[in-house]
Image (spheres, rainbow, N blue to C red):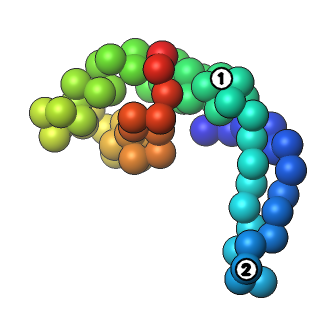
């Protein structure tokens, strides 16, 4: 999943970097990732409910975006 970076902020820990993106960029990146997997968000959500993903990439995407977007 790739996004455009709006800003980088250093956290309280010197080796942590927080990347902030716009909501639109986040949704667009999530949709592109779904498209690359050939899935809809509803299909990915169903896989999560069943606990059975079609690929490790689908599982990783759910971990990244599950419950955070309405696509």
Asked whether 57 or 4 is in front, the reply is 4
In the displayed structure, 30 sits above or below 4; it is above
Residue 5 horizontal side relative to residue 59, left or right: right
Q: With 37 as the anchor, is 28 left or right in this view?
A: right
* In-front residue for pair 12/28: 12
User: Is 15 placed above or below 55 here?
Assistant: below
In the rendering, at what x and y percent does residue 4 appear? 80, 37
Would residue 23 appear left or right of 48 to someone viewing this image? right
Q: How many marks?
A: 2
**Residue furthest toward the bottom?**
14
Q: Is residue 51 visible?
A: yes
Q: Are marks 2 and 1 in contact (CB under 8 Å)?
A: no
* Residue, disc 2: 12
Q: Quadrant of residue 9?
A: bottom right
Res. 57 in view: no
Residue 47, x across and y down, in percent:
22, 30
Q: Position of 4 compared to 57: left or right?
A: right
Asked where in the image residue 54 lies, by quadrant, the reply is top left
Q: Which label belongs to residue 19?
A: none
Could you tell me which secondary element the residue under label 2 belongs to?
Answer: loop
Q: What residue does disc 1 label?
A: 28
Which residue is depicted at the point 84% across and 57% down?
A: 8
Of badges 2 and 1, the one in the foreground is: 2
* Badge 2: residue crowd in 10 Å (few <14, some 14–19, many ≥20): few
Q: Marks 2 and 1, Cα distance to the nearest angstrom?
A: 29 Å
Q: Residue at x 86, y 50 (%)?
A: 7
Residue drawn at x 32%, y 17% is 42
Quarter containing the N terminus? top right
Question: Quick one: which residue is furthest to the front in this view?
Answer: 12
Q: Which residue is at 34% across, 43% downward?
A: 59
At which x and y percent is residue 56? 34, 45
Label 1, secondary structure: give it: helix
């Amino acid at each position: 999943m790739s996004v455009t970076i709006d800003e980088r902020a250093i956290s309280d820990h010197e080796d942590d970097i927080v990347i902030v993106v716009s909501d639109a960029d986040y949704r667009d990146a999530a949709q592109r990732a779904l498209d690359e997997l050939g899935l809809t968000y509803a299909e990915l959500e169903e896989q999560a409910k069943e606990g059975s993903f079609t690929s490790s990439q689908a599982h990783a995407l759910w971990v990244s975006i599950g419950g955070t977007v309405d696509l």
